[in-house]
Image (cartoon, rainbow, N blue to C red):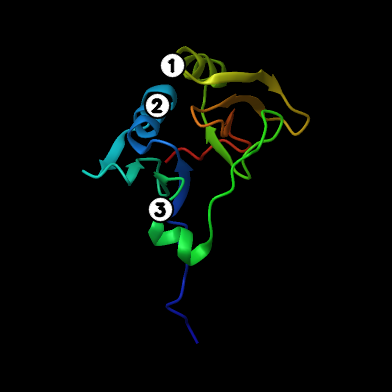
C-alpha cells in the first residue's frame, strides 16, 4: 500500500541574536538570495535550493514556553550544537568571500582524507559554518 506520508526536509532554523543582521550577513558572506524578511524582523529566509535556511530570534515566547529555551555556549571554547554546511565548486573563493564579508576564519580550506576540501568560519553569532566541496559532485543534466 502506497503512503502519502513522504517527508521532505523543508527548513533548517538558526536561532540568532538579530534576524535582519544575520540574513544580510549570510546573503553577503555566502552568496544566498534573501527570500523573505518579515516586517517584525523575527523571521527571515534565504534561498538555498530545496531546503530553506530560516532565522529567528534566540528567545521568543511562542517557542521558549513550548519547547524550551535555546542554549548558547558559555565560553569561546564552546560552540553551538549545530554546524551549517555549504558546498561550493570553488571552496577557496567561497572561503575568501566569507572572510572578506565578516566571517571569522577558523580553519583555511584543506583536502580531507575522505576527498572533500573543507574550510571553517564562524558567523556573526559564533555558529560554525563549513565551506566545502561536493563529496560527490552533483550530476549535470
Mark 2 → mark 3, Cα distance in angstroms: 22 Å
Residue at left 52%, top 14%? 96
Mark 1 → mark 3, Cα distance in angstroms: 29 Å
The residue identified by callout 2 is 25
In the rendered image, the residue lying farthest to the left is 39
On residue 101, the disc is 1
Query: Tag 1: Cα neighbours inside 10 Å, few (<14), some, or many (≥20)?
Result: some
* Occupied quadrant, residue 34: top left
| Residue 41, position as x, y percentages in the image | 28, 41
Q: Is residue 12 left or right of residue 105?
A: left
In the rendered image, the residue lying farthest to the bottom is 1
Local SS, label 2? helix
| Residue 129, position as x, y percentages in the image | 56, 32
* Occupied quadrant, residue 130: top right
Mark 1 → mark 2, Cα distance in angstroms: 8 Å
**Quarter occupied by the C terminus:** top left
Mark 2 or 3, closer to the camera: 3
Asked whether disc 1 touches disc 2, contact meaning CB atoms under 8 Å apart, the reply is yes
The residue identified by callout 3 is 60
Q: Is residue 62 left or right of residue 85?
A: left
Query: 22 or 97, which lies in front?
Result: 22
Amino acid at each position: 500500500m502506497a503512503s502519502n506520508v513522504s517527508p521532505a526536509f523543508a527548513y533548517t532554523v538558526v536561532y540568532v541574536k538579530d534576524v535582519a543582521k544575520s540574513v544580510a550577513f549570510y546573503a553577503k558572506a555566502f552568496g544566498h538570495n534573501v527570500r523573505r524578511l518579515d516586517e517584525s524582523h523575527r523571521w527571515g529566509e534565504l534561498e538555498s535550493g530545496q531546503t530553506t535556511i530560516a532565522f529567528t530570534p534566540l528567545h521568543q515566547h511562542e517557542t521558549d514556553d513550548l519547547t524550551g529555551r535555546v542554549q548558547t555556549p558559555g565560553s569561546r571554547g564552546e560552540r553551538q550544537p549545530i554546524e551549517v554546511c555549504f558546498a561550493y565548486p570553488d571552496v577557496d573563493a567561497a572561503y575568501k568571500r566569507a572572510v572578506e564579508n565578516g566571517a571569522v576564519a577558523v580553519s583555511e580550506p584543506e583536502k580531507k582524507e575522505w576527498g572533500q576540501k573543507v574550510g571553517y568560519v564562524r558567523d556573526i553569532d559564533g555558529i560554525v559554518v563549513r565551506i566545502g566541496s561536493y563529496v560527490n559532485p552533483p550530476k549535470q543534466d
